[in-house]
Amino acid sequence: MIDEKKIEQAVRLMLEGIGEDPDREGLADTPSRIARMCAELYGGMSDDAGIHLSRTFTSDSSEMVIEKDITFYSMCEHHVLPFYGKAHIAYIPDGKVVGLSKLARTVEVFARRLQIQEQLTGQIADALMEYMQPKGALVLIEAEHMCMTMRGIKKPGSQTVTLAKRGVFETDPALEERFFRMMDRR
């Protein structure tokens, strides 16, 4: 649960720490604004992907389902700076499918936490396997990290790509190849 009062206190201390006056006109409401922002950005801490992925529909199809270009925003746990990009999800149904919006909601559940991209990718794939029980799942995430863009090495535009494969995607290279061919049809 987000404790907005603690966040407000911390923001006031940070402002003082960088030499600012937290009571000046432009900053007077900043601690409460940041606390409300944190409640939104980190709202996934108390969310459960199972709520979204447990609502399935019976389907005879066992063909690959892909939801691509799911925009997400997350916060790096190392520098508490944003990283953002696109998530692409594929799964092979085993008697049931999920509403397409539920895949995007699952991305949001895990993205709205302090996170690293590698973990985010695996958490999405694991949730698909746990709650939908497909034959396999694959998650590809492409993201730009502000910790590399605005500080440190300062390389804007660089992309980090992570991939998590579960089930038949781990054992059948042809399925992974088919996924990438379908992704190229943009």
Image (spheres, rainbow, N blue to C red):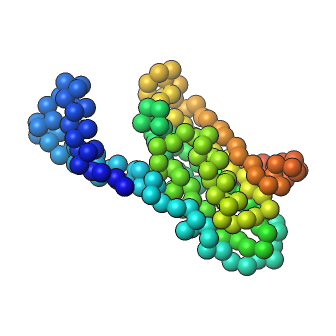
- Can residue 94 be seen here? The reply is yes
What residue sits 50% from the left and 28% below the top?
A: 148
Q: State left or right for residue 184 relative to residue 24.
A: right
* Percent x, y of residue 174: 88, 50
Q: Looking at this view, is 116 or 28 the one in front? A: 116
Residue most extreme to the bottom: 58
- Can residue 178 be seen here? The reply is no
**Vertical placement of 96 versus 177: above or below?**
below
Q: Quadrant of the N terminus?
A: bottom left
Q: State left or right for residue 20 relative to residue 64.
A: left
What residue sits 30% from the left and 51% below the top?
A: 3
Residue most extreme to the top: 153
Q: State left or right for residue 186 relative to residue 8.
A: right
Q: State left or right for residue 45 relative to residue 32.
A: right
Q: Looking at this view, is 141 or 5 the one in front? A: 5
State the count of labels: 0
- Image quarter of residue 163: top right
* Percent x, y of residue 29: 17, 46
What residue sits 61% from the left and 74% below the top?
A: 55
**Vertical placement of 138 versus 153: above or below?**
below
* Percent x, y of residue 51: 55, 68
**Vertical placement of 149 versus 32: above or below?**
above
- Image quarter of residue 23: top left
